[in-house]
């Protein structure tokens, strides 16, 4: 089966763990460690504000010697790269390449978070099809 015919909803991680922009960076890092994820969507109340990656924590917080009391909202990436659940695997791969990202948020037609898809999940899926 060609990757064109696979919908992202078939391989995404549904209902990803999220954090609030007001959460401490330390708490967000603990959550990422506990759930073994490299990205968490960030909300302000019920509004999706962006994403926080393990790389954001290292480059925008640790490398700058920031105080540990800083909050997620201070270092999040507000640029959201997303794909709809019915988006194709080919499209997801092209989006990741063109945007230089390893993960995409999966947003439904109402703009609500449905899941996250990562390069790792894509590679796992493709390897299972060999």
Image (cartoon, rainbow, N blue to C red):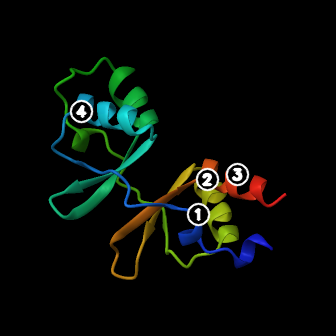
Alpha-carbon distance for marks 2 and 4? 25 Å
Q: Which residue is drawn at 73% across and 76% down?
A: 4
- Comparing 80 with 116, the one in front is 116
Answer with mark 1 or mark 4, whichever residue precedes in sequence.
1
Q: Which residue bears the numbered disc 4?
A: 27
Q: How many C-alpha atoms fall within 10 Å of the one at disc 4: few (<14), some, or many (≥20)?
A: some
Mark 4 → mark 3, Cα distance in angstroms: 30 Å
Work out whether mark 4 precedes mark 3 in sequence or the reverse, and give the earlier one. 4
Q: How far apart are marks 3 and 2 (CA)?
A: 5 Å
Q: In this view, does 111 lie above or below 94?
A: below
Which disc number belongs to residue 121? 2
Binning the other alpha carbons within 10 Å of mark 3 as few (below 14), some (14 to 19) or many (20 upward) gives few
| Residue 128 location (% of width, % of height) | 76, 56
Q: Distance between the residues labelled 1 and 4?
A: 28 Å
Q: Mark 1 points at which residue?
A: 11
Please indicate whether residue 111 sits to the left or right of residue 87 in the image.
left
Q: Which of marks 2 and 4 is in front?
A: 2
* Residue drawn at (58%, 69%) of the image: 10
| Left or right of residue 14, residue 91 in this image | right
**At x 25% / y 28%, what residue is drawn?**
26
């Amino acid at each position: 089966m060609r990757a064109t015919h696979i919908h992202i909803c078939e391989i995404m991680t549904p209902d990803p763990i999220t954090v609030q922009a007001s959460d401490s960076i330390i708490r967000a890092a603990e959550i990422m460690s506990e759930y073994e994820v490299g990205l968490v969507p960030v909300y302000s109340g019920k509004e999706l504000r962006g994403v926080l990656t393990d790389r954001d924590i290292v480059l925008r917080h640790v490398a700058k010697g920031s105080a540990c009391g800083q909050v997620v909202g201070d270092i999040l990436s507000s640029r959201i790269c997303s794909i709809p659940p019915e988006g194709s695997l080919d499209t997801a791969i092209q989006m990741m390449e063109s945007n230089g990202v390893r993960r995409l948020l999966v947003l439904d037609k109402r703009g609500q978070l449905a899941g996250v898809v990562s390069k790792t999940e894509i590679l796992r899926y493709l390897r299972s099809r060999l």
